[in-house]
């Protein structure tokens, strides 16, 4: 059993993953012979043990793909994928308040603690691949909402996520299966 990041981080068996999507700090992600451009944290990358909420850094490590969230108005039949997928509703959020019991978990908005809105005015969260970073169990303050999602024009840095062009996210989802993982490497 491979342990990702600091003590009590999500456990993941690297040998059980059928495919690893490898995101490099140099701004590329590779899988199955394909290489695509990606954006990582605007403040760079950091060891998972040193990751902190709001530091704008992507955590180094191997993160299991949990499931996919998508905008049903953009993908009325859902994305093409073998992964579990769920439509995002207008009141869906993700708690990013370290002191809250729902930290790094989905919530319904309005929520009494700080939470990121998943239904956005821009297309960044039209497709969201939820990664198993700091979720088994969530440790307050070690980072929340580490996703793989759509990149903004020009690929500016993220708040810690992995961001790709829409076509590349769709291509990744078409081949991804349960048990696959995203690895963030230096």
Image: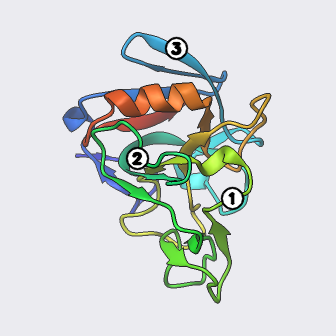
- Kindly report which numbered mark, 3 or 2, lies closer to the viewer in this rendering: 2
Whole-percent x, y for residue 29 in the image: 53, 23
Q: Name the quadrant containing residue 153.
A: top right
Q: Earlier in the sequence, mark 1 or mark 3?
A: 3
Q: Earlier in the sequence, mark 2 or mark 1?
A: 2
The answer to whether residue 51 is left or right of residue 178 is right
- Kindly report which numbered mark, 1 or 3, lies closer to the viewer in this rendering: 1
- Reading the image, the residue beneath label 2 is 78
Dots 2, 1 in contact, CB < 8 A: no
- Reading the image, the residue beneath label 1 is 120
Query: Where, quadrant-wise, is the C terminus in this rendering?
Result: top right
The residues bearing labels 1 and 3 have C-alpha atoms spaced at a distance of 28 Å
Q: Nearer the viewer, residue 88 or 97?
A: 88
Secondary structure of the residue carrying tag 3 is: strand
Residue 57 appears anywhere in the view: no
The residue under the point 77% across, 41% down is 42
Secondary structure of the residue carrying tag 1 is: loop
The answer to whether residue 171 is left or right of residue 97 is left
**Residue positioned most to the top:** 33
- Compared with 123, 152 (above or below) is above
- Kindly report which numbered mark, 2 or 1, lies closer to the viewer in this rendering: 2
Q: Nearer the viewer, residue 39 or 86?
A: 86
Dots 3, 2 in contact, CB < 8 A: no
Secondary structure of the residue carrying tag 2 is: loop
Whole-percent x, y for residue 159 in the image: 71, 50
Label annotation for residue 95: none
Q: Name the quadrant containing residue 87.
A: bottom left
The residues bearing labels 2 and 1 have C-alpha atoms spaced at a distance of 17 Å
- Reading the image, the residue beneath label 3 is 35
Please tell me how many numbered marks the rendered image carries. Answer: 3
């Amino acid at each position: 059993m491979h342990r990702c990041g600091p003590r009590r981080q999500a456990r993941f068996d690297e040998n059980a993953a059928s495919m690893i999507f490898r995101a490099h700090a140099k701004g590329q992600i590779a899988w199955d012979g394909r290489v695509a451009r990606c954006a990582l944290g605007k403040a760079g990358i950091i060891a998972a043990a040193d990751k902190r909420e709001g530091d704008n850094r992507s955590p180094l490590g191997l993160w299991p793909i949990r499931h996919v969230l998508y905008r049903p108005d953009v993908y009325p039949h859902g994305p093409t994928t073998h992964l579990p997928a769920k439509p995002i509703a207008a009141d869906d959020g993700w708690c990013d308040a370290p002191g809250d019991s729902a930290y790094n978990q989905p919530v319904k908005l309005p929520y009494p603690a700080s939470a990121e809105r998943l239904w956005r005015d821009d297309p960044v969260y039209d497709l969201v691949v939820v990664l198993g970073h700091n979720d088994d169990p969530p440790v307050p303050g070690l980072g929340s909402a580490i996703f793989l999602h759509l990149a903004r024009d020009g690929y500016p840095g993220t708040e810690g996520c992995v961001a790709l062009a829409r076509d590349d996210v769709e291509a990744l989802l078409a081949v991804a299966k349960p048990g696959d993982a995203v690895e963030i490497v230096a």
